[in-house]
């Protein structure tokens, strides 16, 4: 049954806000999937046009401890933003060494390892404040901010900065409502080589990863080019689950050599940003070659895509990235069922025994609430296929035709040999308790086989 999300589920998530302005995320050397969705500043509420948009271009080395003395450089920070305590224009988020968006999506169900500083309790939600640690920022100019140290409450409840932690530095204009510029850096000892993190910007409206990721599939067989550069996995043999990004581009056919899928996720976000160019991410140097018709993986891509190899020492990650995945599903690297690359959850189940119900013309009806014969499917746009019933068909077929409903959005369509018609439903209908507003009851037929289900954009069961 699809999960229900409400503010109560986010009581331990801290300051999650509605996105009221485009957020500028500056991905540094260590991108972490989903960091764009962590926090939205209350300062963006009622935002008006600012003189310019802040952009972080560099963060000096961020050592562990209470007093890192970090310099943040960039443009359009405004002036007069120095403070000792809390600010609506500056925030530090410590994600821990392995922090990801999954901690936030599962708030209250798994231990929370991330915490915030500098932003104050005004960013709390439902009375919970992970922002009680204060900060000392003695200097703030239009192009440079000095973050000297943490203050009150640092060190309590595990609120400490340790080597290897992922830190998100966030800056809003000092005097005008703007969206934030973010830079993701890795905490390193003061004696470690390197001079900090150079941040290149990419603008997205929310979390850049909207599907897949964070799943190991199989060991597979690695294939290398003549100079021992790892090649992407053969079709159907991906070693890590694909990632779909907010612009509908994909990282797929992922192969790893002495690396893991978490590292593959991280460097894949860099490909979404680089879009075919070379880049550095998480200590990996990534190069790409353009590919297209006639290439080994062309059957899963439309037009040009890019073959990436990312290396750090002997460790390698290889994959394909492109803006136009083909009509087949990223199951070629994810193992998920269905087609079109829109499944975000559920699916792949086997039919449960149940009683079929039919309407006029022996048209199969969706299953009663709580008695679905196949597992729901959630799509990447947060719509759902639920209350699934089958007559002479199986759940694999139900998955396949359900994807067509996400595309048809209430209209009639054909998929996988089935002809599908939807009836508009709403308040007072049999399944209304599971939906908010309008949804559609679909019946799909091919010969004597039928699949019925409800599809809608606002599931609430």
Image (cartoon, grey):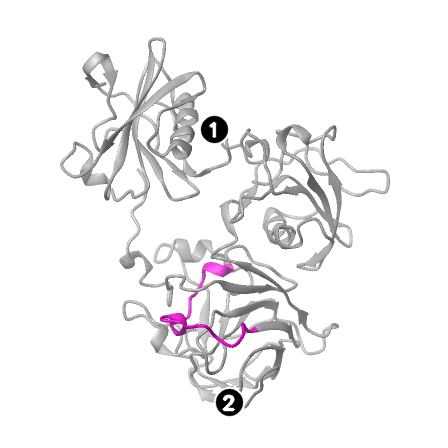
Residue 362 found in image quarter: top left
Judged from this view, the residue extending furthest toward the top is: 447
What numbered label is drawn on residue 80? 2
240 w.r.t. 103: above or below: above
In the image shown, does 459 or 441 lie closer to the viewer?
441
3D distance between C-alphas at marks 2 and 1: 55 Å
- Residue 35, x across and y down, in percent: 51, 60
- Residue 201, x across and y down, in percent: 61, 64
In the image shown, does 302 or 232 lie closer to the viewer?
302
- Residue 284, x across and y down, in percent: 71, 56
Q: Is 416 on the left or on the right of 97, as rendered?
A: left
Magenta span: 35-54
Magenta-span inclusion, residue 43 = yes
Residue 177 found in image quarter: bottom left
- Residue at image coords 70%, 60%: 283
Q: Quadrant of the N terminus?
A: top left
What numbered label is drawn on residue 338? 1
- Crowd rating for badge 1 (residues with CA inside 10 Å; few <14, some 14–19, many 20+): many
């Amino acid at each position: 049954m699809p999960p229900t999300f409400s503010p109560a589920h986010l009581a331990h998530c801290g300051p999650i806000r509605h996105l009221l302005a485009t957020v500028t995320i500056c991905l540094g050397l260590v991108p972490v999937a989903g960091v764009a969705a962590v926090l939205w500043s209350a300062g963006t509420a009622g935002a008006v046009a600012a003189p310019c948009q802040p952009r972080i271009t560099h963060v000096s080395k961020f050592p562990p401890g209470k007093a890192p003395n970090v310099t943040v450089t960039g443009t359009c920070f405004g002036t007069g933003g120095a403070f000792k305590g809390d600010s609506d224009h500056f925030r530090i988020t410590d994600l821990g060494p392995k922090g990801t968006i999954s901690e936030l999506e599962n708030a209250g169900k798994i231990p929370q390892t991330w915490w915030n500083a500098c932003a104050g309790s005004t960013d709390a939600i439902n009375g919970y404040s992970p922002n009680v640690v204060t900060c000392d920022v003695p200097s703030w100019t239009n192009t440079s901010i000095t973050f000297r140290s943490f203050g009150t409450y640092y060190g309590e409840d595990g609120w400490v900065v340790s080597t290897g932690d992922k830190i998100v530095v966030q800056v809003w204009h000092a005097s005008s409502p703007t969206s934030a510029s973010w830079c993701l850096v890795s905490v390193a000892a003061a004696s470690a080589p390197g001079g900090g993190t150079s941040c290149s910007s990419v603008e997205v409206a929310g979390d850049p990863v909207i599907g897949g990721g964070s799943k190991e599939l199989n060991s597979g067989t690695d294939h290398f080019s003549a100079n021992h550069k790892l090649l992407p996995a053969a079709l159907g043999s991906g070693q890590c689950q694909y990632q779909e990004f907010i612009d509908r581009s994909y990282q797929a056919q992922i192969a790893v050599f002495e690396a893991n899928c978490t590292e593959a996720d991280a460097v894949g976000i860099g490909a979404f940003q680089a879009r075919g160019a070379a880049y550095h991410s998480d200590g990996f140097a990534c190069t790409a070659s353009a590919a297209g018709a006639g290439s080994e993986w062309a059957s899963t891509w439309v037009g040009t895509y890019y073959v990436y190899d990312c290396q750090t020492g002997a460790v390698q990650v290889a994959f394909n990235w492109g803006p136009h995945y083909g009509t087949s599903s990223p199951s070629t690297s994810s193992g998920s069922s269905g087609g079109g690359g829109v499944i975000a959850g559920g699916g792949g189940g086997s039919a449960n025994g149940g009683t079929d119900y039919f309407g006029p013309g022996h048209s199969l009806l969706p299953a009663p609430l709580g008695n679905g014969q196949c597992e729901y499917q959630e799509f990447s746009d947060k719509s759902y296929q639920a209350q699934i019933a089958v007559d002479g068909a199986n759940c694999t077929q139900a998955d396949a035709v359900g994807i067509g409903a996400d595309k048809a959005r209430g209209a009639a369509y054909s998929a996988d040999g089935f002809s599908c018609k939807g009836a508009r439903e709403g308040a007072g209908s049999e399944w209304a308790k599971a939906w908010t507003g309008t949804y559609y009851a679909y019946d799909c037929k091919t010969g004597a086989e039928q699949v019925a289900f409800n599809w809608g954009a606002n599931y609430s069961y």
